[in-house]
Amino acid sequence: MVNRARVLIWICAILLAAAFLFAGLSKLGGPSAIRWSTRFVGWGYPVGASSVVGVLEILGGLGVLLPRWRRPAALLLAVLMLGAIATHMLHAEFSRVLPPLVLGGLALLLTYQSRVVR
């Protein structure tokens, strides 16, 4: 019989991996990377910060797919989303708070559930 908790953990991990790989890659290349760089500078972050965040999102997205690295990767993603939430709140971009709130919540859930379910 299939353990439902493990299936849900894998579904959550795959969703997070897809979301963060897409987001991270968009910060590293193509026309959207230029827009991300402009946004980060506009928020007061140094030039290149969007690339650092993009790399961390990619590493976190890949990490949640590896059971041994799932908890630290999910925790990294949760911390990144906390930063995104704080940035959007500080700059009164309230309509942009929901995506990092949901993704951060899923990352925290994955952090906790990966510890409980082995």
Image (cartoon, rainbow, N blue to C red):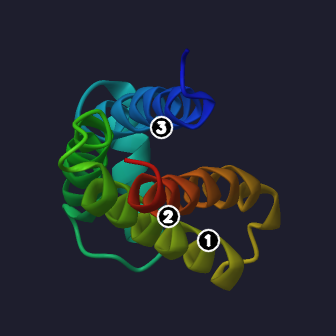
Foreground: 113 or 52? 113
Distance CA(mark 3)–CA(mark 2): 15 Å
Q: Residue at x 32, y 64 (%)?
A: 76
Foreground: 116 or 27? 116
* Amino acid at circle 3: Leu
User: Residue 47, located in which quarter of the rendered image?
Assistant: bottom left
Q: Earlier in the sequence, mark 3 or mark 2?
A: 3
Distance CA(mark 3)–CA(mark 1): 17 Å
Residue to which mark 2 is pinned: 112
Residue to which mark 1 is pinned: 85
Foreground: 101 or 111? 111
Label 2, residues with CA under 10 Å away: few <14, some 14-19, many ≥20: some
Distance CA(mark 1)–CA(mark 2): 20 Å
Q: Secondary structure at mark 1?
A: helix
Q: Earlier in the sequence, mark 1 or mark 2?
A: 1
Q: Residue 43: where, in percent of width, then height?
A: 48, 74
Residue to which mark 3 is pinned: 16
Q: Earlier in the sequence, mark 3 or mark 1?
A: 3
Location of the N terminus (image quadrant)? top right
User: Residue 28, located in which quarter of the rendered image?
Assistant: top left
* Amino acid at circle 1: Ile
